[in-house]
Image (spheres, grey):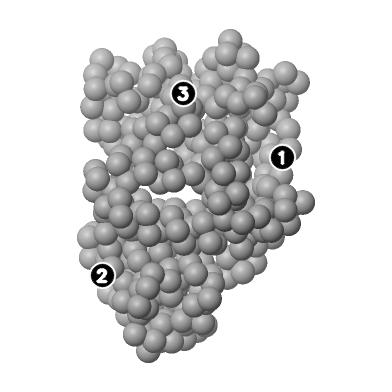
Amino acid sequence: MGLTARVELAIVNPIEVRNWDCLVQQLPGAGFFHGSAWARVLQGTYGHQPAYIASFAGDRLLGTLPVMEVSGRLLGRRGVSLPFTDSCFVLSEDGGDTSAFYRQALSYGKRRKWRFLECRGGTRQWQGSSPSVQFYGHRIELEPNEQAMLDRMGGATRRALRKAGSAGLKVEFRQDEVAMRTYFELHCLTRKRQGIPPQPWRFFENIARHVLEAKQGFVAIATAKRPVAAAVFFKKEREAIYKFGASDYRWQELRANNLVMWESMKRLAREGIEHLSLGRTSMGNEGLRRFKVGFGAREQKLDYCRYDLREELFVMSGDGAEGWGTRVFRRLPLPLLRLAGRMIYPHLS
């Protein structure tokens, strides 16, 4: 008998549930974003309110659909599973029917007057759903045998690693706020080149506090007299996530991004991590796609589904990868671009 026939569902805040992280990690497929750390980052930075759909049998968690309520004057109120997350799957103890989680989320959203509910990945059991937008998802299988991982890489990636090695780059791993500040400076440079406002420093400061200090992630920094590339990784149990990457384009020929990824892969494998998720990639971003596939990543389609609660139907949406705004943001001085990020991101998800 499926989960929906046995228990009632409740709306909970994982930050306030005792032992939430221990409870959720008992569910098959649980990952970093299902834990309370990410909820703390989002609530502490932007004020988004957790509204996780959950079912319990006594003290045991049977399943959950993580949702945050996002409110803003620009886009109104909506539910997102989860904001600034590449994918977040509904979890169930027995792997049974999870459609009731989506029904409960929609019912709650109607009471809260959400414009829409958006879920990112794992939506096959959302009855009648259709993708609003698709991305590529990439995942690398890690193992202690470094040569085996190298053999799965593309020739261009291996050449880039040799070039980075011959350039004398050094990669260090850190879990402190100073390291996050180093990443943030490179992040701002990268976002300006891409024509995208950077997330505000407060966002990364909260990641340092709630994720890095809890030993659930690290910053990898490549240095050539000065920091030239960096990346932020999250980890939980046997899975890790490549969440952010940035670099100083003036040092692009050193292939520091490649070395940061490879050294991080080796470190994670030594720690017993078995899988590394590389997040989402826009369908039109062929350069980033090649970068990820070059490390031997397996590729799959990642569906996002958005249900319009006013029209009561699934609707299409764009991935926002390119538009008129990118041309404007590329021209802004860095201080103004950072200001734009502080003003815009509280309204986004």
Q: Which residue is mark 1?
A: 317
Q: Secondary structure at mark 1?
A: loop
Q: Residue at x 25, y 15 (%)?
A: 58
Tell me whether the residue at label 1 lies in contact with that at label 3, contact meaning CB atoms closer than 8 angstroms: no
User: Label 1 to label 2, Cα distance in Å?
Assistant: 41 Å
Q: Which residue is mark 3?
A: 49
Mark 2 sits on what residue?
144
Q: Residues within 10 Å of mark 3 (few under 14, many from 20)?
A: some
Q: Is residue 18 left or right of residue 264?
A: left
| Mark 1 neighbour class, 10 Å CA radius: few under 14, some 14 to 19, many 20 or more | few
Residue drawn at (32%, 46%), measured in percent from left and top?
Answer: 208
Which label sits in the foreground, 2 or 3?
A: 3
Q: Is residue 138 left or right of residue 64?
A: right
Between disc 2 and disc 3, whose residue precedes?
3
- Secondary structure, mark 3, is strand
Q: Disc 2 and disc 3: Cα gap in Å?
A: 40 Å
Element on which disc 2 rests: loop
Write the residue at 33% across / 33% down. 36
Question: For the C terminus, which image quadrant?
Answer: top right
Count residues near mark 2 (Cα–Cα under 10 Å), then give few for <14, some for 14-19, many for 20+.
Answer: some
Residue 56, quarter of picture: top left
Tell me the quarter of the picture where residue 202 sits.
Answer: top left
Q: Amino acid at mark 2?
A: Pro
Foreground residue, 176 or 53?
176
